[in-house]
Amino acid sequence: MDIENLVKRKNLKLTTARMEILEKLLHASRPLCYDELKNGISMDKATFYRNITKFEDKMIVNSFESNDKKRYFELNQPLHAHFICVICDKIECIKEPLDFNLKGYSIENIILKGKCKKCNQI
Amino acid sequence: MDIENLVKRKNLKLTTARMEILEKLLHASRPLCYDELKNGISMDKATFYRNITKFEDKMIVNSFESNDKKRYFELNQPLHAHFICVICDKIECIKEPLDFNLKGYSIENIILKGKCKKCNQI
DNA sequence: AACTTTAATGCAACTTAGTCGCATTAAATA
DNA sequence: TATTTAATGCGACTAAGTTGCATTAAAGTT
Ligand SMILES: [Mn+2]
Ligand SMILES: [Mn+2]
Ligand SMILES: [Zn+2]
Ligand SMILES: [Zn+2]
């Protein structure tokens, strides 16, 4: 995936701040929050949130809130659920397709909370 | 359901603050946040949150976070999903049983976000 | 390459849901 | 009624996220 085109196609200026955020998200295997993303990137907190909000508006990124009251971000992908463990707070992307047949609704985000495989068998 | 017994069975003191919170939740048809619950009840914010946390520990109440970054509370009930509309912010309890077979996980909370029936057809 | 326009940035101040310490009060038990 | 212990109110605090504003940098134009 080409970050440069991703940004320009949406009529956003290509800044180093934006490159840094998207580069990190591209190489992540799970959603990340500001605290995790800020390490090694240089921009101000306000800049980060303004950019991430713009990414969400332009459908480049999506997010959800976790147990710790922080927002977690990932590059937009086909809809899949996120599992948040109430014991160890780990966040997992769930690959298995879960189909809810809720007629009339359109679903954009699925969050499941509970005990993950590891914590469940303790 | 008898609130008095609900509280005493969990070895909690029966205070008017606790009665008021639980009475309101008992008569609600959807989860409520502090702002909604505080109307007509007299206790301090700190007291409210300390009580609601205790109720959660004792499995009398469960909660989740909505779009507006507030926690929403309801009396503990058989597991069911909550749908949060990203357009109108309405929160609905989903009656339809959604069964997905995520082996190994135990699921305690299901949150779906998207467009509700009404907002979806606009 | 310099010039212009416009959007992006940094900084500091702010907002707000929720938390905490501590002195006071009320519930349970004897 | 007296004693114990948990619950309450109050004010100060925390921390994620937001906003206003002056400055800077990206993209387009000459
Ligand atoms: Mn994911
Ligand atoms: Mn419900
Ligand atoms: Zn876990
Ligand atoms: Zn709606």
Image (cartoon, coloured by chain):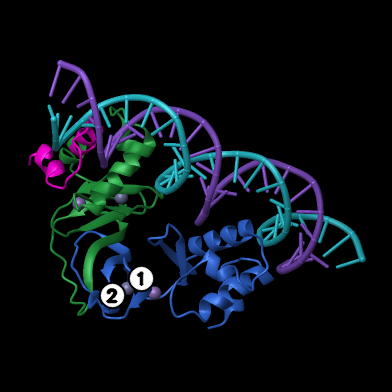
Chain colours: A green, B blue, C purple, D cyan
In the drawing, does residue A2 fall left or right of residue B27?
left
Disc 2 residue: CB within 8 Å of ligand 4: yes
A24 versus A74 height, above or below: above
Q: Is residue A121 visible?
A: no
**Is the residue marked by circle 1 packed among few (<14), some (14-19), or many (20+) residues within 10 Å?**
few
Q: Amino acid at mark 1?
A: Cys
Residue B97 can be seen, yes or no: yes
Q: Which mark is residue B119?
A: 2
The image quadrant in which ligand 2 is located:
bottom left
Residue A58 % position (x, y): 21, 52
- Residue B61, image x, y percentages: 48, 68
Residue at image x 58%, y 58%? Answer: B50
Q: Are marks 2 and 1 in contact (CB under 8 Å)?
A: yes
Q: Quadrant of residue B83?
A: bottom left
Q: In what element is the residue under mark 1?
A: loop
Magenta-span inclusion, residue A113: no
Q: Is residue C16 left or right of residue A43?
A: right
Name the amino acid, label 2: Cys
Q: How many marks?
A: 2
Q: Secondary structure at mark 2?
A: helix
In front: C28, or B110? B110
Percent x, y for residue B81? 31, 71
Highlighted magenta segment, given as a residue range = A1-22
* Residue topped by disc 1: B88
Q: Position of residue A14 (x, y in %)?
A: 18, 35
Q: Which residue is depicted at the point 24% across and 46% down?
A: A31
The CB of the residue at mark 1 lies under 8 Å from ligand 4:
yes
Q: Is residue A63 above or below residue B56?
A: above
Foreground residue among B5 and B92:
B92
